[in-house]
């Protein structure tokens, strides 16, 4: 049995969102070294602020400044910081109830070790040198021996308020395709497409999954399919994807390879986008050194009859 593949994988995208008046004021305030909360109808001050009372669901916009100092309510030690975290040396994650607030703010506390942090200790904000209107404008918290720090008396009104933010989201993990898809990937490197047949319903799954999702039984019988196939359905792509060197418009299609029990997807080339159709017979086009087909092109064969692929739509 061939060794099962595995590789590091990162899923990353920038999440862009607009800000309401409360979040806009909070983040703009951080840029100006001001911490703003919001007062609820029963006079609680929430930091970070929200736009609706979590108890009554009423809209709240009464901004109030709180101090940049506070008290640790609970904490956990982070002995191995990860990429993108506030500090690159071990630190404590802490919930801090800032002076003047009734709720706690989560952030990092810069201390030399877990023996230096405790519930109830006094801390204050260490501001980042360069601030742009984000939670990272608070570089971290640091130990503090004094009482409530001085506030500025800010009203929460800003001339150059921030209206939106871009928050990068990223997940790093090690991915293993498993036994069945490892065989599928290894076959692709030889310019072959291999699926697995269900011993019960006899459907050939491409890519193989190691088990039949319909019958719930394991699959192990390998079946080579294709290389030619039939376009079952397709869409015309008119928006250019970032870092994808393909001119728009182009066509992405579901392709039922000959002998397969379901369709896989691939790009259609070698034909004007407005001439792609259901039933079009296609074949893979490989580029030098590629581990999978670059695209599929028409074979020149007559179109497949609808009855031959209707169950694969």
Image (cartoon, rainbow, N blue to C red):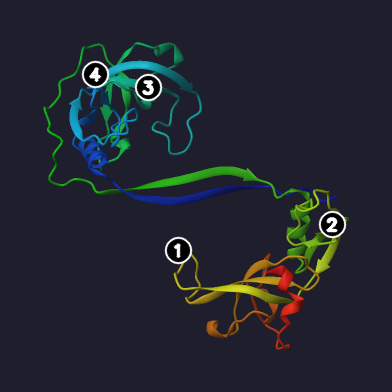
Q: Secondary structure at mark 3?
A: strand
In the rendered image, which residue does mark 3 sit on?
95
Q: Percent x, y for residue 67? A: 21, 22
Circle 4 sits on which residue? 99
Mark 1 and mark 4: Cα distance apart in space: 45 Å
Closer to the N terminus: mark 1 or mark 4? 4
Alpha carbons under labels 3 and 2: distance apart: 53 Å
| Lower position in the chain sequence, tag 2 or tag 4 | 4
Q: Which residue is mark 1?
A: 242
| Mark 1 / mark 3, whichever is N-terminal | 3
- Separation of marks 1 and 3 at Cα, in angstroms: 38 Å
Q: Nearer the viewer, residue 130 or 32?
A: 32
Residue receiving disc 2: 198
Q: On the picture, is 298 further left or further right than 164?
A: right
Q: Position of residue 33 (x, y in %)?
A: 20, 32
Looking at the image, is mark 3 or mark 2 nearer the viewer?
Answer: 2
Name the front one of labels 1 and 4: 4
Q: Of the residues tagged 1 and 3, which is closer to the observer?
A: 3
Q: Mark 2 or mark 1, which is nearer the start of the sequence? A: 2
As helix, strand or loop, the secondary structure at mark 2 comes to loop
Q: Is the residue 142 above or below the residue 297 in the image?
A: above
């Amino acid at each position: 049995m061939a060794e099962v593949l595995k590789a590091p994988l990162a899923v990353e995208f920038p999440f862009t969102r607009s800000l309401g008046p409360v979040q806009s004021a909070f983040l703009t305030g951080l840029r100006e070294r001001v911490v703003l909360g919001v007062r609820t109808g029963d006079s609680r001050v929430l930091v970070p602020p929200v736009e609706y009372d979590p108890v009554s669901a009423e809209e709240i916009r009464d901004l109030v400044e709180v101090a940049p100092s506070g008290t640790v309510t609970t904490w956990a030690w982070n002995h191995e910081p990860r990429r993108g975290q506030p500090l690159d040396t071990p630190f404590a994650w802490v919930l801090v109830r800032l002076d003047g607030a009734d709720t706690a703010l989560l952030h990092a506390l810069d201390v030399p070790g877990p023996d230096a942090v405790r519930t109830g200790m006094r801390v204050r904000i260490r501001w980042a040198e360069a601030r742009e209107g984000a939670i990272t404008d608070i570089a971290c918290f640091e130990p503090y021996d004094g009482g409530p720090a001085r506030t500025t008396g800010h009203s929460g009104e800003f001339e150059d308020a921030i209206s939106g933010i871009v928050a990068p989201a990223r997940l790093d993990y090690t991915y293993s395709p498993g036994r069945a898809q490892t065989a599928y990937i290894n076959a692709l490197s030889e310019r072959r497409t291999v699926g697995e047949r269900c011993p019960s319903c006899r459907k050939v799954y491409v890519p193989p999954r190691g088990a039949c999702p319909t019958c719930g039984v394991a699959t192990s019988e390998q079946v080579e399919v294709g290389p030619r196939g039939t376009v079952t359905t397709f869409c015309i792509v008119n928006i250019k994807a970032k870092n994808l060197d393909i001119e728009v418009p182009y066509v992405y299609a579901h392709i039922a390879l000959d002998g397969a029990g379901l369709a896989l997807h691939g790009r259609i080339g070698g034909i004007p986008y407005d001439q792609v159709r259901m039933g079009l017979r296609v074949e893979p086009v490989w580029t030098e050194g590629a581990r999978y087909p670059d695209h599929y092109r028409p074979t020149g064969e007559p179109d497949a009859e609808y009855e031959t692929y209707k169950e694969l739509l």
